[in-house]
Image (tube, grey):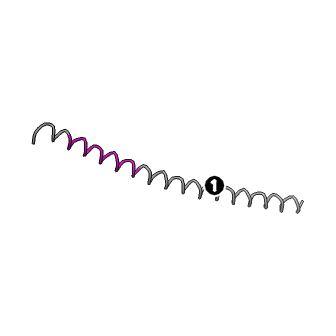
Amino acid sequence: MDFEKKTLNSFASMRDDIDRFQESMNDWIIFLDGELRESKIQVKELQKRISELEMETRLRF
């Protein structure tokens, strides 16, 4: 192989690596976003339950 062809192949391989890296990062972002949503829902449910318990406690005393 001549130098020019090796260089072009090297850049093509690098481009493929970058594309795969971007796809991987996108997958992670989607995964983390989903986890964040689930966590927010759980926090809201817990806040609601705490409020309910506080109201029950106030009504008893």
Location of the N terminus (image quadrant): top left
Across and down, in percent, residue 27 comes to: 44, 54
Which residue does the image show at 36% across and 48% down from the upper left?
A: 21
For residue 59, what is the image quadrant?
bottom right
Q: How many marks?
A: 1
Residue that numbered label 1 is attached to: 40
Q: Main secondary structure of the magenta part?
A: helix
Q: In this rendered view, identify the residue nearer to me: 46 or 30.
A: 30
Across and down, in percent, residue 56 comes to: 83, 62
Q: In this rendered view, identify the residue nearer to me: 50 or 11.
A: 11
Above or below, 53 against 18 in this view is below
Most distant residue in the left direction:
1
Which residue does the image show at 69% across and 57% down from the upper left?
A: 44
Q: What stretch is highlighted in magenta?
A: 8-24
Is residue 20 shown in magenta?
A: yes
Q: In this rendered view, identify the residue nearer to me: 45 or 14.
A: 14
Which residue does the image show at 15% across and 41% down from the upper left?
A: 5
Most distant residue in the top direction:
3
Binning the other alpha carbons within 10 Å of mark 1 as few (below 14), some (14 to 19) or many (20 upward) gives: few
Q: In this rendered view, identify the residue nearer to me: 55 or 60.
A: 55
Across and down, in percent, residue 11 comes to: 25, 41
Across and down, in percent, residue 29 comes to: 48, 51
Residue 58 located left or right of residue 17: right
Dot 1 falls on a residue whose secondary structure is helix
For residue 43, what is the image quadrant?
bottom right
Amino acid carrying mark 1 in the image: Lys
Is residue 19 shown in magenta?
A: yes
Location of the C terminus (image quadrant): bottom right
For residue 9, what is the image quadrant?
top left
